[in-house]
Image (cartoon, rainbow, N blue to C red):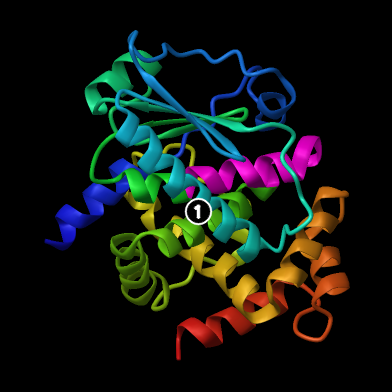
Amino acid sequence: MKTLLALLLLSCCACVDIPVDGSPAAAIAQPVEAPYQGLDPGYKTEETAHFAVKAYTSSSALLNAGLLEENYTRIMQDLGLYSFVPARPYNVTIYRDADEYHAKTGQPGWSGGAAYGNALLLYEGEGLKATIGHEMTHLVFNEFMGLSQSGSLRWLNEGVAVYEESRSNQASAAFYADSVRSGVAPNPIPFSQMINLVPQNESQRSVDRWYAQAGSVAGFLIKQGGSFSFSIFLGKLRDGATVDKALEDTYSGLWKSLPELEKAWKLEVQR
């Protein structure tokens, strides 16, 4: 049962940021000229304050528009981005099933959703709720961080996405909690490796521990320091501060460097 759940979560939560010229920043900067095929004629559209949703039925478009707004509100609150306003509504395409999604997006078989520019590519299925929580976090994180974001912060980008996925879906929460308890706590990845040795392919089962740990660390920052402090931390990183400098300026009463954060986090997960 545990193996089945792990495979399901890997399939539904794999994130794929489709770049324009090979860099996440370029994907944010460019207009959304998506390298994928849309839905077949006759699809329905539902528009909300923050999303334009396309799906094959009105009920699906309406239901998922509500789910998207629910996740959007929670993500903004958790990350402390109360005053941040996206430049334009996010475009969401929900394919009929996995077969149509893979055929029209060209994504690998293990991919359950993709974030591109200001667009989400999803499909109807059991993993949709978890995928929305994960991929939407990438959209918000990428746009807030803007052109200053670099590959060196992917650990944090993926970490907050895993944390929000867990917040949106009970099965994901149980899976990652078990991964931290059984796979991370007994043998944590040194932070110097966690932030530098980023997995290149989410289809590799060996990267589960990295994602679980990144999500745990991001959640620790948010819960221990508060969402407002986390937004300040993100802002300093966006403005070019190193992780150590951003931690010192934001959380001086708690941690002044990555090694101090690592020590405190280990005490939390290993107790």
Query: Amino acid type of disc 1?
Result: Asn
The residue closer to the viewer here, 195 or 24, is: 24
Left or right relative to 52: residue 263: right
The residue closer to the viewer here, 129 or 150, is: 129
Query: Residue 81 occupies which quadrant of the picture?
Result: bottom right
Q: Position of residue 220 (x, y in %)?
A: 58, 74
Crowd around label 1: few <14 · some 14–19 · many ≥20 (10 Å): many
Residue in the image at 36% along x and 43% along y:
63
Q: Is residue 86 above or below residue 206?
A: above
The residue closer to the viewer here, 253 or 101, is: 101
Q: Is residue 78 above or below residue 30?
A: below
Q: Which residue is mark 1?
A: 71
Query: In the rendered image, which quarter contains the C terminus?
Result: bottom left
Left or right relative to 139: residue 247: right
Q: Position of residue 207 (x, y in %)?
A: 40, 51
Q: Position of residue 119 (x, y in %)?
A: 55, 29
Residue in the image at 75% along x and 62% along y:
231
Label 1 SS: helix
Residue 254 falls within the magenta-colored stretch:
no
User: Is the stretch drawn in magenta largely helix, strand or loop?
Assistant: helix
Q: Is residue 41 above or below residue 170?
A: above
Q: Which residues are magenta?
A: 134-152
| Outermost left residue | 1
